[in-house]
Image (cartoon, rainbow, N blue to C red):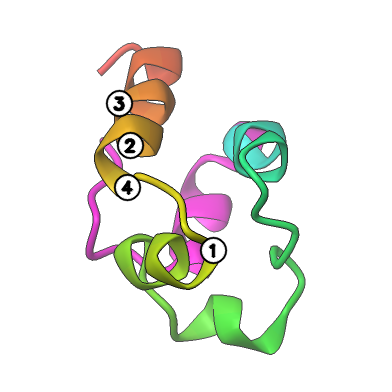
Amino acid sequence: MVSKDMTIQSIIEAHEDVAPILMASGMHCLGCIMAHGETLEQACAVHGIDVDELLGRINEFLGE
């Protein structure tokens, strides 16, 4: 399960198959240095993305 307080890097390391979902949502920062220290919630705030909606899509995709 992915949560708001996970870093982008930790999400990708645990579930690399969600990268296309993040990219399609407008998060093209997967290789960015900020991905190592920025949480999903922080990244969504910076990119103007609804974190709850994105989190729902990711966890639904993962079947969690």
Identify the residue at horizontal 35%, vertical 15% (top origin): 60
Identify the residue at horizontal 61%, vertical 43% (top origin): 22
How far is disc 3 from disc 2 in space, using C-alphas?
4 Å
Q: Secondary structure at mark 1?
A: helix
Disc marking residue 51: 4
Q: In which quadrant is the N terminus drawn?
A: top left
CA neighbours of label 1 inside 10 A, class few (<14), some (14 to 19), many (20+): few
Q: Secondary structure at mark 3?
A: helix
Q: Secondary structure at mark 2?
A: helix
Residue 19 on the magenta span: no
Q: Secondary structure at mark 4?
A: helix
How far is disc 1 from disc 4 in space, using C-alphas?
10 Å
What stretch of residues is rendered in magenta? 1-17
Q: In which quadrant is the C terminus drawn?
A: top left
Quarter where residue 16 is shown: top right
Of residues 36 and 23, the one nearer the viewer is: 23
Above or below: residue 50 compared with residue 24: below
Residue under label 1: 47
Above or below: residue 57 compared with residue 13: above
Residue under label 2: 55
Tell me which amino acid carries mark 1.
His
Identify the residue at horizontal 54%, vertical 63% (top origin): 47
Q: Nearer the viewer, mark 1 or mark 2?
A: 1
First along the sequence among labels 3 and 4: 4
Residue 19 image point, x, y percent: 67, 42
Disc marking residue 56: 3
Q: Outermost residue, front direction?
A: 48
